[in-house]
Amino acid sequence: MRDEATGTKGKLRFEGVEKAFPTKDGEYKALAPISLDVEERQFVALIGPSGSGKSTVLRLVAGLEERTAGEITMDGDAIFGPGPDRGMVFQDHALLPWMTVKENVLFALDCNPDGRDKEEREKAASEYLDLVHLSRFADQKPSQLSGGMKQRVGLARAFALDPRVLLMDEPFGALDALTRGVMQTELLGIWEEAAKTVLLVTHDVDEALLLADRIIVLSQGPQARIKADMNVPFERPRDQDEILSSKEYPELHRELLALLREEIAV
Ligand SMILES: Nc1ncnc2c1ncn2[C@@H]1O[C@H](COP(=O)(O)OP(=O)(O)O)[C@@H](O)[C@H]1O
Ligand SMILES: [Mg+2]
């Protein structure tokens, strides 16, 4: 169901969520009971050492994994299985090579019927391609685009689907530093236009501080828990240069790095 119909925009609640995986050496308890409320339209960054369960948290919300205990709800309804109300942005963009950029976005919309007619879907595809500055490339094939541009198509596609929650697992991890910076600015722009609840996994402290309203630090597993829950005080719309030169930035940056270092040291 679309936002207008429900009047809600992706409030998430985790209550005592645990996840254990069977392994050949017995059960591996990845997540300790985790409880967390994510407000609608909040932009949350999840950081933590490798193996702390960040991807597992996203996969649980996506409905790609089943929790072992506890409950996850979105706007009050328990999550069981995947659905178009939760969109994923993949690190490898997952575009279909034989379709044009615009066809890729439209195809995703066609696969997830939500009551919008053909004209409205066309309009959404064009609007979001415009927001990520790709209108000129709408009729090109993905092979003609750079890695960063393909990732921008992935962003446009995810937003055009109009999910209540967007899940991004290190979406810019495969990009070079310069392109990554451009992508972060694109994401800021598109998110500030069409604010959605976002869970973004990143290991980049700067990325988390630039983009998120709130940063959740997970501890090292097994039984990873929420080690810190930090509010990011920067006003929106955000400007990267202003943030970098603000007086709060160095302190927040140091604090986050220290929290991560403690985890990696053990
Ligand atoms: N399908 C699985 N089977 C067994 N163990 C898994 C599985 N998926 C993840 N794990 C384990 O759970 C822990 C958390 O994994 P993950 O969520 O991928 O961590 P992160 O994304 O923070 O690097 C890791 O120790 C990982 O090895
Ligand atoms: Mg991961």
Image (spheres, rainbow, N blue to C red):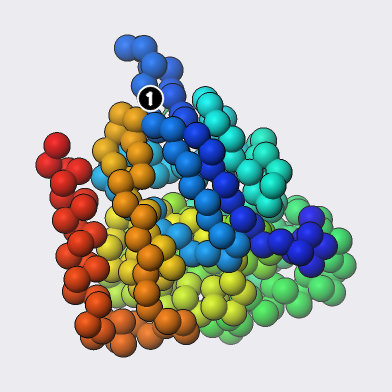
**Near-viewer residue (197 or 190):** 197
Q: Is residue 66 left or right of residue 241?
A: right
Q: Residue at x 71, y 43 (%)?
A: 77
Residue that label 1 marks: 29
Q: Position of residue 66 (x, y in %)?
A: 57, 30
Eyeballing the image, is 32 above or below 252? above
Query: SS class of the residue under badge 1?
Result: strand
**Near-viewer residue (34 or 24):** 34
Identity of the residue furthest to the top in this view: 25
Residue 140 visible in rendering: no
Q: Position of residue 132 (x, y in %)?
A: 54, 78
Give the quarter of the image for residue 25: top left
Q: Position of residue 131 (x, y in %)?
A: 58, 81
Identity of the residue furthest to the left in this view: 265
Give the quarter of the image for residue 116: bottom right
Amino acid residing under circle 1: Lys
Eyeballing the image, is 89 above or below 57? below
Q: Residue at x 69, y 72 (%)?
A: 125
Q: Residue at x 21, y 52 (%)?
A: 259
